[in-house]
Amino acid sequence: MRTPTHVAPATRDNALPPADTVDTPQPRGAPPAPPAALESRGQRLRRHLHQGRLHGSALAVVALLAVLVALAATNTARVRVDWLLGSSRVSLVWLVLAAALIGWILGVLASARFQWLTRPPRTRRPARGSQAAPPAGTRG
């Protein structure tokens, strides 16, 4: 059996550096990749606390959904609702859910309005067409 003579010995697999030590080229202007460091004790504690909060909130959502299903199952009686121009009969659970949904939407809108009214003042921009003087010490 003949071995190929055109293969240089430097291209054999054992002559190449391990894959984890090869530097991958970074795009221009990109910050250098951070060195692979171990997680500190404080970082690990913060990560575990965050994970615990996520588990707690998931458990709270499941409990809330269970209460909502129980509420729907027990409040199926029809009740009379008086409107300004008449009345109707609806299932109590739909009345409660509609009231909760309307209250939630109004709360979100009120929160957005309050946030808009209390936002920090914006900096004034120069009017269109006016030439602002360049900052001192620069050539313009």
Image: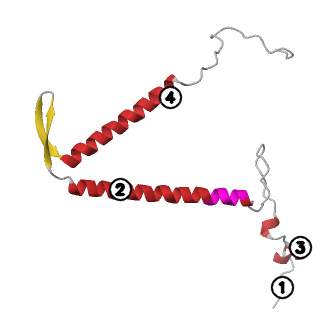
Q: Which residue matches tag 3?
A: 10
Of circles 3 and 1, the one toward us is: 3
Quarter of the N terminus within the rendering? bottom right
Q: Residue at x 87, y 16 (%)?
A: 137
Determine the image quadrant of residue 11.
bottom right
Q: Which residue matches tag 2?
A: 65
Place of residue 67 in the rendered image (x, y in percent of width and height, measured from the top left): 32, 56
Q: Amino acid at mark 3?
A: Ala
Q: Which residue matches tag 4?
A: 115
Which mark sits nearer the N-terminus, 3 or 4?
A: 3
Majority secondary structure in the magenta region: helix
Task: Find the distance from the CA under tag 3 to the CA under tag 1.
Answer: 15 Å
Q: Is residue 90 left or right of residue 133?
A: left
Place of residue 53 in the rendered image (x, y in percent of width and height, measured from the top left): 54, 56
Q: Amino acid at mark 2?
A: Leu
Task: Find the distance from the CA under tag 2 to the CA under tag 1.
Answer: 71 Å
Place of residue 109 in the rendered image (x, y in percent of width and height, measured from the top left): 40, 31
Which mark sits nearer the N-terminus, 4 or 1?
A: 1
Q: Which residue matches tag 1?
A: 3
Of circles 4 and 1, the one toward us is: 4
Which mark sits nearer the N-terminus, 2 or 3?
A: 3
Which mark sits nearer the N-terminus, 3 or 1?
A: 1
Dot 4, crowdedness within 10 Å: few (<14), some or many (≥20)? few
- Dot 4 falls on a residue whose secondary structure is helix
- Dot 1 falls on a residue whose secondary structure is loop
